[in-house]
Amino acid sequence: MSNRILLVVGDKFAAYARGKDVITVSNLRGLLTLSIPLLPHQGRTVLVPGQGLNEEVVKQLLEEAAQSPNISQFDFSLWHDMPQRASISLTHKHRPENVLVSKPVRMNANQFQMHLMVDEDCELMKDHLSGQHVQGMVLIEAARQGMLAVTEAYLIPENGIDYSFVFEALSVQYSHYTFPLGAVIEANITECAVDNPKRLHFAAETIVKQCGQTVSEFTMSFAAMERSRISKREGMMATKTQAHFMREVAANLESQELYVQKVENL
């Protein structure tokens, strides 16, 4: 007797679910909350968590499953050992649903690994969705967060300095679509200059792999400097840019006024 295997994805990936061994969260919740048992069938259905889920949804589904008259027909064993989402402090986000990667694991001196963990309620899933693949901007943000998490967790020296980060360069290459399945992010640190505590410098090559195949590649570099120093510099640049902008506005207004006067005098 063989078990059936179903992937479970967030509702925003409903288009991907059509015609495949895939079910959305809402569909699964409907099956679990039926008041009568499903028709008997051979084997159990093994449910595999895909993209679009978050910890609260997983918790709710497991609670609903425990009370469902159909629980004997579903296997939730893979839902009890899911990767731990990285913290908002490691990824420099304010809301947990916007964190797209798991906590990084060090594989060797310069290589780190994370899981892609897309919450369908995140900021980048609000628009421009095909319903089939994970859009490229999500992968860029995941790669960026991954490098921040690796740097914060493993590379920043413990010297008491409160650092802020500035990205210097980012290049992206997509080779395949990324779908709402499990995916791994691998980061290889190519530069880690931390001798000067006033300005740290990092560079990395990061790839996203799905089903053992590289689907996108990222090369990035960034610096870390004392937060107060960056804030002061940012404030000075903001004041300078604001003054420049207002001079341009004034000049445009003056030009328009002179043009109107010229037309009226014709």
Image (cartoon, rainbow, N blue to C red):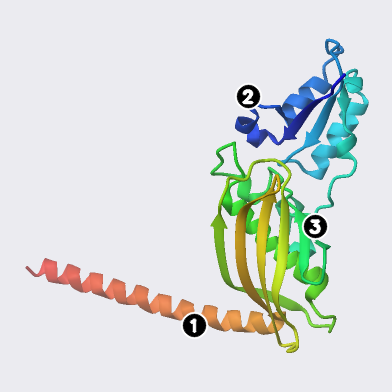
Question: Do the residues bearing badges 1 and 2 touch, measured as CB atoms within 8 Å?
Answer: no
Few, some or many C-alpha atoms within 10 Å of disc 3 (few <14, some 14-19, many ≥20)? many
Mark linked to residue 86: 3
- Dot 3: what SS? loop
Q: Is residue 140 left or right of residue 111?
A: left
Residue pointed to by mark 1: 240
Picture quadrant where residue 64 is located = top right
The spot of residue 260 in percent (x, y) is: 18, 68
Q: Residue at x 57, y 51 (%)?
A: 136
The spot of residue 154 in percent (x, y) is: 82, 71
- Dot 2: what SS? loop
Q: Is residue 75 left or right of residue 255?
A: right
Q: Residue at x 67, y 40 (%)?
A: 180
Few, some or many C-alpha atoms within 10 Å of disc 1 (few <14, some 14-19, many ≥20)? few
User: Which numbered mark, 1 or 2, is in the foreground of this view?
Assistant: 2
Above or below — where is 265 with respect to 113?
below
Q: Residue at x 49, y 82 (%)?
A: 240
Mark linked to residue 204: none
